[in-house]
Image: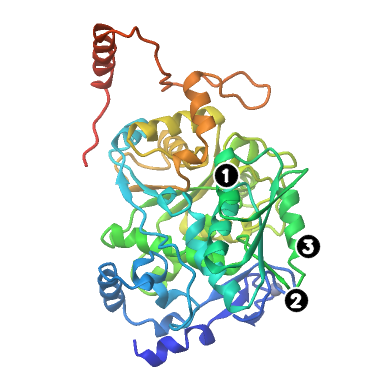
């Protein structure tokens, strides 16, 4: 690609309404979050034909991994041919991305799979997948001259936005439901200097509030309704394929909360397909928690209609869950803002949306820990969902499967402690009996007692499969 072509990347991109009957286009410098004509969601379209051929892109991206330029070191900006920014733009980065793809043999065996890989986005700078989208959203906020960035959050978005706003020297305000954010996520946001504004009400009410605030000219909204968030997050698909040696996995499973992450992955895979970097789409599976699963419910109704040959058009309206309930607080969202983009991506890929129980999430989380990986509860919906799909025959035992983990295990240590102590419970329900509970053990302060305990545990460990790498 010539330097001239890279200079015009932003100029050639548009923000387009995804509602087919509307299809309105807006310039990338317009500060809008939804279509001004119909209120529909926007997405950014880059001119992919100026990106160069597939082999040249693969080679250039591989070479950049060895460079010391921050633009090349970032696992998001490394793929900047596909981002709607000019080459000379000053970027706001914490060297996000570059997250590992691990082999997870114990989780694979738990699911009934021959092998399972996990892409751990919790290894980002603030411990969650949000950083990949925040680097592009805050870069755009700076370009637009925004003074204050704002988001509604269940915790991870807040921590990430607070960090990137601090890097950019911007004021940051986060709106969170009082008493529903984990201590770790709140601690991060305070440390990064954000104004933490706690409201009485749940996440969906916080989301409604920030959309009202976004009308104010001094404020830039950084929730995943913002199409620049999705642009950064879609690079996860590029990095994943690069780590797979461009050999496409058959299935990719991702947790479903506000549905921005699955929307972004779907967009990333779609762009790779259009650039002929891959020759088909992986089946995208989105997993929700049972008490907070409006999209899974809609998907199963659509499947019933398909079976009855009543058609399966994407509906206009999603019935929200009024009082979402789950201990996986990162996905405790009853009215997901990006459901339409996500569901469109799932349907195109031949994937699915399903829901799993609190017990399944908790046990899957503990088994991921036994692979030496660890994650926050919402991430474990993926392994629980994959296990279900293998049991139902939707995924074959020898299929290639990637689970996307979205948050670090230390995002919610209280959940982990309660699981292992047998006190983890949702509301007034009975505590979850952890199949892999591993509580601390009181031992006498004597060498023999310690050796005896180690020996007992060694014998039980030998029955578990070992990691290959
Ligand atoms: Zn529109």
- Tell me which numbered mark, 3 or 1, is placed earlier along the sequence: 1
What is the spatial separation of the Cα atoms under label 3 and label 2, in whole angstroms?
Answer: 17 Å
Residue 101 position within the rendered picture, expressed as x and y whole percent measured from the top left: 32, 50
Quadrant in which residue 454 is drawn? top left
Quadrant in which residue 194 is drawn? bottom right
The residue shown at (60%, 36%) is 290
- Tell me which numbered mark, 1 or 2, is placed earlier along the sequence: 2
What is the spatial separation of the Cα atoms under label 1 and label 2, in whole angstroms?
Answer: 40 Å
Tell me if I can see residue 385 in this picture.
Answer: no
Q: Is mark 2 within 8 Å of ligand 1?
A: yes
Tell me the quadrant of the picture where the C terminus can be found: top left
Task: Determine which of the numbered discs, if any, sits on residue 385 in the image.
Answer: none
Residue depth check, mark 3 versus mark 1: number of the one nearer the observer: 1
Which residue is label 1 attached to?
Answer: 187
Tell me if I can see residue 210 in this picture.
Answer: yes
Which residue is label 2 attached to?
Answer: 37
Side (left or right) of 221 relative to 246? right
Residue depth check, mark 3 versus mark 2: number of the one nearer the observer: 3
Task: Determine which of the numbered discs, if any, sits on residue 212 in the image.
Answer: 3
The residue shown at (69%, 68%) is 40
Q: Secondary structure at mark 3?
A: helix
- Tell me which numbered mark, 3 or 2, is placed earlier along the sequence: 2
The residue shown at (53%, 87%) is 11
Residue 97 position within the rendered picture, expressed as x and y whole percent measured from the top left: 40, 59
Q: Secondary structure at mark 2?
A: loop
Residue 387 position within the rendered picture, expressed as x and y whole percent measured from the top left: 42, 35
- Image quadrant of ligand 1 equals bottom right
* Residue in the foreground of this view, choosing between 142 and 109: 142
Determine whether 189 is above or below 53 in the image. above
Quadrant in which residue 103 is drawn? top left
What is the spatial separation of the Cα atoms under label 3 and label 1, in whole angstroms?
Answer: 27 Å
């Amino acid at each position: 690609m010539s330097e001239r072509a890279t200079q015009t990347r932003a100029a050639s991109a548009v923000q387009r309404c995804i509602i087919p009957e509307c299809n309105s286009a807006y310039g990338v410098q317009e500060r809008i979050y939804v279509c001004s004509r119909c209120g529909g969601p926007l997405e950014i379209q880059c001119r992919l034909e100026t990106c160069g051929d597939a082999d040249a892109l693969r080679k250039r991206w591989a070479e950049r991994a060895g460079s010391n330029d921050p633009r090349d070191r970032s696992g998001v900006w490394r793929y900047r041919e596909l981002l709607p920014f000019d080459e000379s733009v000053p970027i706001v980065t914490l060297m996000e991305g570059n997250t590992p793809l691990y082999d997870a043999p114990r989780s694979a065996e738990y699911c009934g799979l021959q092998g399972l890989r996990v892409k751990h986005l919790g290894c980002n700078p603030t411990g969650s997948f949000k950083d990949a989208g925040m680097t592009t959203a805050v870069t755009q906020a700076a370009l637009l001259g925004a003074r204050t960035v704002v988001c509604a959050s269940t915790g991870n978005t807040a921590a990430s936005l607070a960090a990137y706003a601090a890097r950019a020297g911007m004021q940051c305000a986060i709106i969170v439901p009082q008493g529903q954010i984990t201590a770790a996520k709140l601690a991060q946001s305070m440390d990064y200097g954000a104004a933490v504004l706690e409201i009485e009400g749940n996440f969906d009410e916080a989301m409604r509030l920030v959309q009202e605030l976004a009308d104010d000219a001094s404020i830039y909204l950084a929730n995943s309704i913002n199409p620049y968030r999705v642009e950064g997050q879609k690079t996860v698909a590029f990095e994943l394929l690069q780590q797979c040696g461009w050999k496409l996995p058959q299935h990719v499973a991702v947790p479903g909360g506000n549905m921005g992450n699955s929307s972004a992955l779907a967009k990333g895979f779609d762009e790779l397909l259009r650039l002929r970097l891959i020759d088909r789409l992986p089946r995208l599976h989105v997993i929700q928690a049972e008490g907070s699963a409006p999209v899974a419910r809609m998907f199963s109704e659509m499947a019933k209609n398909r079976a009855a040959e009543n058609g399966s058009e994407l509906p206009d309206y999603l019935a929200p869950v009024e009082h979402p309930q789950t201990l996986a607080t990162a996905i405790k969202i009853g009215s997901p803002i990006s459901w339409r983009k996500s569901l469109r991506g799932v349907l195109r890929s031949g994937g699915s949306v399903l829901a799993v129980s609190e017990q399944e999430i908790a046990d899957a989380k503990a088994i991921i820990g036994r692979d030496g990986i660890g994650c926050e509860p919402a991430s474990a919906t993926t392994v629980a969902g994959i296990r279900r799909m293998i049991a139902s025959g939707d995924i074959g035992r020898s299929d290639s499967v990637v689970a996307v983990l979205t948050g670090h295990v230390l995002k919610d240590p209280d959940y982990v402690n309660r699981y292992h102590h047998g006190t983890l419970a949702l509301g007034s329900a009975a505590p979850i009996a952890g199949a892999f509970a591993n509580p601390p053990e009181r031992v006498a302060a004597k060498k023999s007692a310690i050796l005896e305990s180690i020996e007992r545990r060694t014998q039980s460990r030998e029955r578990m499969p070992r990691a290959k790498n």
